[in-house]
Amino acid sequence: MGLNHFFKKLFISPKDGLSHSGEKPITDEEIPNLVQSSLEKTLRLEDEHKAGLRDIFKDHDLSEIEKEFFSALLLALEENKLNPSLLRLERIGGGTINVSYVPLCFVGKINLTITPDKYAVMKEDHKRALRVFGTIEEANTYMSEKGGDRVEVRPGENRHYMQYSRGLQSIKHLNNPTLQECIDTIPRWIAFIKYCKRTP
């Protein structure tokens, strides 16, 4: 549900204050208080709505890039009148996240991780590293204490991947996509959820 929906649904028109059961209508002096009260209620419920969306991800340690992707997904769900609270995430091996829209369907997979750089302490006459570290500081400390000629940087591996379905039988894959390419593919997830809603 978009914020416009909340405002339309929750904002109380002064005319709504008129009672149909014989009570006195509100006075002109009461209208500003009623409008202020309605606005406060709307803003409070909007904050609760945002908190509710955050709750969807509270059990997941998401990276900034993952948060950006899933924020775009939540927005797309709302824009398509789909319930974001039905979204379920399950992190599996290698940073991949399974995404489901319960109880309807498994939506797809997404992986937006890049493994950290590694730092290998090398000797000139060896092809293999003496030792590999997670930080340059650890590698330099080892080299100063135990020997070695240089530190070789081994860049992290880009594991970006996205899976989506077309119908019930066809599964498509994006290998090494950019974040924007993943966001641009969200409509395929939305279309599949809608397809599942139509399919008995």
Image (spheres, helix red, strand yellow):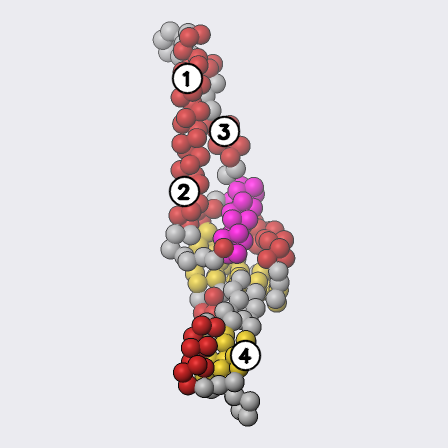
- Residue that protrudes farthest toward the bottom in the picture: 125
**Residues tagged 4 and 3 counted as in contact (Cβ below 8 A):** no
Name the residue located 46 percent from the left edge and 15 percent from the top edge. Answer: 14
Circle 3 SS class: helix
Q: Earlier in the sequence, mark 2 or mark 4?
A: 2
Circle 4 SS class: strand
- Identify the residue under disc 2: 51
Q: Is residue 70 left or right of residue 19?
A: right
- Residue 7 is tagged as 3
Q: Earlier in the sequence, mark 4 or mark 1?
A: 1
Name the residue located 49 percent from the left edge and 55 percent from the top edge. Answer: 64
Cα–Cα gap, marks 3 and 2: 17 Å
Cα–Cα gap, marks 2 and 1: 26 Å
- Identify the residue under disc 1: 34
Q: Is residue 199 visible?
A: no
Q: Nearer the viewer, mark 3 or mark 2?
A: 2
> What amino acid is at disc 1?
Leu
Closer to us: 29 or 140: 140
Please give the range of residues in magenta. 65-82
- The x and y percentages for residue 7 are 49, 29
Count of numbered circles in the view: 4
In this picture, is 180 found above or below 36?
Answer: below
- Identify the residue under disc 4: 152
> What amino acid is at disc 2?
Ala
